[in-house]
Each structure stands twice: as structure tokens, then as C-alpha cells.
Amino acid sequence: MKTINTLHKCGAVLACALISLAIGAEAQASGDHGKSPLSRLKGNYGFHAQGFFNAHFDAAVQQTTGAVAERVGVYTFDGKGHCTIHSLANKAGLANAVYQNTEDCTYTLNKEGIGEVTAALGGKSFNTYFVLVNGDREFMFTRREGTSNTDGSGASLIFAMAKKQ
């Protein structure tokens, strides 16, 4: 009997140890080492964005109108909540593309990989909302400017993807 009780105790201890190892391995595989989620986003991410400038939803025809706009550039994240954006923008009707660099740029990121960039670019402040995908090597993002207009007129609607360089 004493041998069986000792075996049961050893089995329970071994089971607990295996469970602890499995949990530790899972946390390590997911990249969760007790670090801030901000550290998941570090380095350069090249992007291409497209959308509408001066967008307005026309209820009569059920479509969004406005000038087609595109932007290419690079986000740089420091892993601590600060960032920069260097980009080239173009929209229908412009004679030349416009180079722009951020004047100020910060970001937040939760443990699920959903975040927000707050930046000033070209004299305007804006928020960009994103989600990390593909093992944190890419993020999809969207931005809407001009939200102070209650009818949405004058807004820039942007949808894009960025990839780690």
C-alpha cells in the first residue's frame, strides 16, 4: 500500500511538472515573456495604402465619392510606443506627389495584437487603427480623417497593409 501511495504521489508530481512545462512552452512559443505588448512591434514596416480623399457617402446612389488617394511609405516602430512615418502621397487632381514625414508619432498595442497609432502628418493629427497578423510580420490598418464633420464629408478613408522589412 505504501508503495502504491508513493507511486500516486510521484505520478501527481510528475503530472504537475509536465503541465507546468507545457504551459511554459506555450507561453514561450507565443512570445509572451512578460514583456510589454509594445515590444511586438519593432522595426520598419513598408506599406501601400489606398482610399478616398474628401470622401462623402451619397445616399441617393449608395456609394462613396471622392478623389482616389494612394500613399506608400515606411512606419518605424521602436518597441516602446514611439514611431515615425515617412511617406509619399498622391491623389487624383494633384500635379505632383507629396512627401510627408511625421511631426509626432506614438502607438499603443494590446496583448491581442490590436493597436492604434496617433500621429501628426502634414500639419494634421490622425489616428490609425491596426491589427497585427502573420506572426507580427504584417499589420492591416485603417484610418479615417475628417471625423469632426458629423455627415462624414471631407473625410479621408484609408485601408492598407504593411509588411516588416
Image: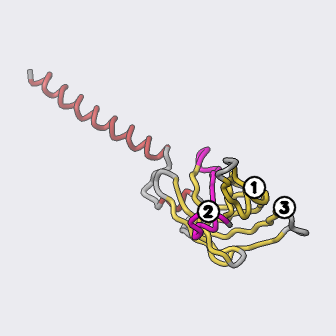
Q: Is the C terminus in the top left, top right, bottom left or bottom right quadrant?
A: bottom right
**Residue 70 makes an appearance in the image:** no
The x and y percentages for residue 96 are 89, 69
Q: Quadrant of residue 2?
A: top left
* Front: mark 3 or 1: 3
**Disc 2 target residue:** 152
Mark 3, secondary structure of its residue: loop
Instruction: Indicate which disc, 2 or 3, sits on the residue closer to the N terminus.
Output: 3
Q: Residue at x 70, y 48 (%)?
A: 61
Q: Residue at x 61, y 61 (%)?
A: 42
Please report the residue visible at 52 percent of the width from the left and 52 percent of the height from the top.
113
Which disc, if any, is residue 119?
A: none
- Which amino acid type is shown beneath numbered disc 3? Ala
Q: Position of residue 45 (x, y in %)?
A: 69, 58
Are there few (<14), some (14-19), or many (20+) residues within 10 Å of tag 1? some
In depth, the one of 99 and 143 nearer the eye is: 143
- The residue lying at 24 percent from left, 35 percent from top is 13
* Amino acid under disc 1: His
Residues shaded magenta:
133-153
Q: Mark 2 falls on what kind of element?
A: loop
Real-space Cα distance between discs 3 and 1? 16 Å
Please give left or right for residue 111 compared with residue 97 in the image. left
Q: Residue furthest left?
A: 1
Asked whether the beta carbons under mark 3 and mark 1 sit within 8 Å of each other, the answer is no
Q: Which residue is mark 3?
A: 92
For label 2, the crowd category at 10 Å Cα-Cα, with few meaning under 14, some 14 to 19 and many 20 or more, is some
Q: Is residue 107 visible?
A: yes
Where is 27 relative to 49, above or below? above
33 lies left or right of 151? left
Q: Which residue is mark 1?
A: 48
- Residue at the extreme front of the image, as rendered: 60
